[in-house]
């Protein structure tokens, strides 16, 4: 069995999720490295091929959000008939307003957003609803309306578990509040700032979903044509590439092996609009890396 299909405990939820989960951002919203053509979302039939394809591979975690524009709608249209095959996570607080988004964390806006997500996803219940924090996350926590709306939706059977997508001090507050079953945090070879918080989640039985595990493509072969540009973390990326003889695939394999070695990570959310790229991630994780190099990292 592929390492990427290894089922890991999602904290104390009683659910197991595949180590590689699917991030449904790029099937619904323009995103990623490159020019407009590379960043543009696929059409609906192509999105359906990807969504059915990831389920056929055995991935059982799908992560989406209201802010991902067409993503929830496409999940509902394409794979709601296969609803029993996947653990479904979405987010609230940041709302779609194409081509952009807006934030509204009031009780009514969040309750209405959850109801709209249910309608778009064509499901009676969303397994995990996460706070999609914006520019003033402390106010969201202090006001308490978002969490109150999520808890009421949970009592009504519309969502099963509560989560938050955050890092730093806000993430620590969420972890220590006792309100959240799952945390979603950015973590990768070039951003390890929340490493201790991931460990704390493990101690408290809180599931951890990692976003940005491949740094939005900057820890893959896709970064190599852009190294002449002013991309973020350029020097660190070049240092890591030097460790693997400037091989982009080995860079991605190293980044995935680094995440796989952390037992407190439940699932790494990897998104793509290309099914071949998703299959490639499975193959790269299988390659592993030299344990001495992993220890150095």
Image (cartoon, rainbow, N blue to C red):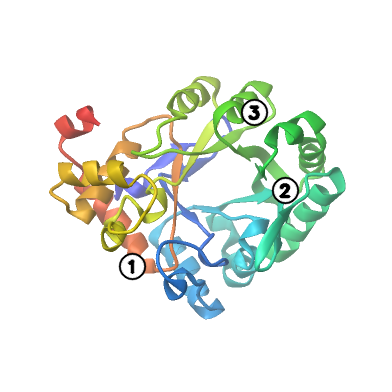
| Lateral position of residue 4 relative to residue 15, left or right | left
Residue matched to label 1: 276
Horizontally, residue 143 falls left or right of residue 173, namely right
The vertical placement of 199 against 46, above or below, is above
The CA span between labels 2 and 1 is 32 Å
For label 1, count other residues whose C-alpha is less than 10 Å away and answer few (under 14), some (14-19) or many (20+).
Answer: few
Residue 217 locus on image (x, y percent): 37, 55
Front position in the image: 51 or 64: 64
For disc 2, the marked residue is 93
Asked which secondary structure carries label 2, the reply is loop
Q: At which x and y percent is residue 191?
A: 40, 37
Could you say where residue 182 lies in the image, as x and y percent from the top left?
Answer: 58, 35
- In this figure, which residue is indicated by the disc labeled 3? 174
Q: Residue furthest left?
A: 245
Image point 62% across, 32% down: which residue? 181
- For marks 2 and 1, the one nearer the N-term is 2
Query: With respect to residue 121, does 38 lie above or below?
Result: below
**Residue for point 66% across, 39% down:** 161
Q: CA distance from mark 1 to mark 3?
A: 36 Å
Q: Which mark is in front, 1 or 3?
A: 3
Question: With respect to residue 34, does 93 lie above or below?
Answer: above
Choose between 172 and 279: the one closer to the eye: 172
Q: Are marks 2 and 3 in contact (CB under 8 Å)?
A: no
């Amino acid at each position: 069995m592929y390492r990427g299909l290894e089922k890991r405990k999602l904290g104390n939820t009683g659910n197991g999720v595949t180590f590689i989960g699917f991030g449904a951002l790029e099937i619904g919203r323009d995103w990623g490295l490159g020019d407009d053509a590379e960043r543009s979302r696929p059409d609906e039939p192509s999105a359906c091929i990807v969504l059915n394809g990831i389920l056929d591979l055995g991935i059982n975690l799908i992560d989406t959000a209201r802010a991902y524009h067409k993503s929830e709608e496409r999940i509902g249209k394409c794979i709601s008939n296969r609803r029993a095959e996947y653990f479904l996570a979405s987010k609230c607080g940041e709302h779609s307003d194409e081509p952009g988004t807006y934030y509204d964390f009031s009780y009514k806006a969040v309750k209405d957003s959850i109801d709209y997500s249910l309608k778009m996803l064509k499901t009676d219940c969303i397994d995990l609803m996460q706070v999609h924090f914006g520019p003033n996350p402390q106010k969201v926590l202090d006001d308490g309306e978002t969490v109150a709306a999520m808890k009421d939706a949970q009592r009504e059977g519309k969502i099963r578990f509560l989560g938050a997508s955050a890092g730093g001090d806000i993430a620590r507050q969420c972890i220590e509040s006792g309100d959240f079953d799952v945390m979603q945090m950015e973590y990768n070879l070039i951003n390890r700032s929340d490493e201790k918080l991931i460990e704390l989640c493990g101690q408290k039985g809180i599931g951890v979903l990692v976003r940005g595990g491949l740094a939005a493509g900057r820890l893959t072969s896709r970064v190599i044509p852009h190294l002449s540009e002013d991309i973020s973390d350029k020097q660190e990326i070049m240092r890591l590439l030097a460790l693997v003889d400037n091989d982009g695939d080995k860079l991605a394999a190293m980044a995935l092996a680094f995440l796989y070695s952390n037992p407190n990570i439940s699932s790494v959310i990897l998104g793509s609009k290309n099914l071949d790229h998703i299959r490639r991630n499975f193959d790269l994780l299988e390659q592993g890396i030299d344990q001495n190099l992993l220890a150095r990292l």
